[in-house]
Image (cartoon, rainbow, N blue to C red):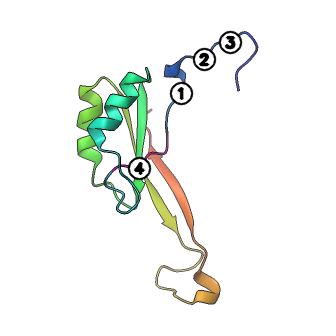
Amino acid sequence: MSSPGVKLKPSDYVHLHNHTQYSLLDGLTKVPALIDRIKEMGMGSVAMTDHGTMSGTIEFYKAANAGGIKPIIGMEAYVAPRAHEDRDPAYDRQYFHLIIPAIKI
């Protein structure tokens, strides 16, 4: 939400939750296409938060830097209510996702 009289620019917005082709069965976006789209929209930064993997980190980092876009590297982790080896459907059916960005300050 902006204050009255304040006009937001595309560079004021950052996509912080994006899946690429490295999110198996969930992501479709190829890293170079993501960077091209972010540049086309006039944004200066974007995050990659694939499901349970950081396999595309190097490709994403290099493509973003080459395109003049600030990369925000992260991951979407799965959070189980109990231990990871618990498999009782009565207790362990529900799971949660947690977005973990790594931001350089």
Magenta range: 16-20
Residue hosting label 4? 19
SS category of the residue bearing label 2? loop
Quote the CA–CA distance across marks 1 and 2: 8 Å
- Amino acid residing under circle 4: His
- Give residue 30's position: percent from left, percent from top: 29, 44
Residue type indicated by callout 1: Tyr
Residue identifier under label 3: 6
- Residue 82, given in percent of the width and then of the height, sits at 57, 79
- Give the prevailing secondary structure in the magenta stretch: loop
- Pick the front one: 33 or 84: 33
Number of residues whose C-alpha sits closer than 10 Å to that of mark 2, classed few (under 14), some (14–19) or many (20 or more): few
Q: Quadrant of residue 70?
A: top left
Query: Gap in Å between the C-alphas at discs 1 and 4?
Result: 17 Å
Q: Which residue is mark 2?
A: 8
Tell which residue pokes out farthest to the right in this image: 4
Which label is found at residue 33?
A: none
Does the magenta-highlighted stretch encompass residue 55? no
Q: Which residue lies at the image location 27% right of the left edge and 29% below the top edge?
A: 65
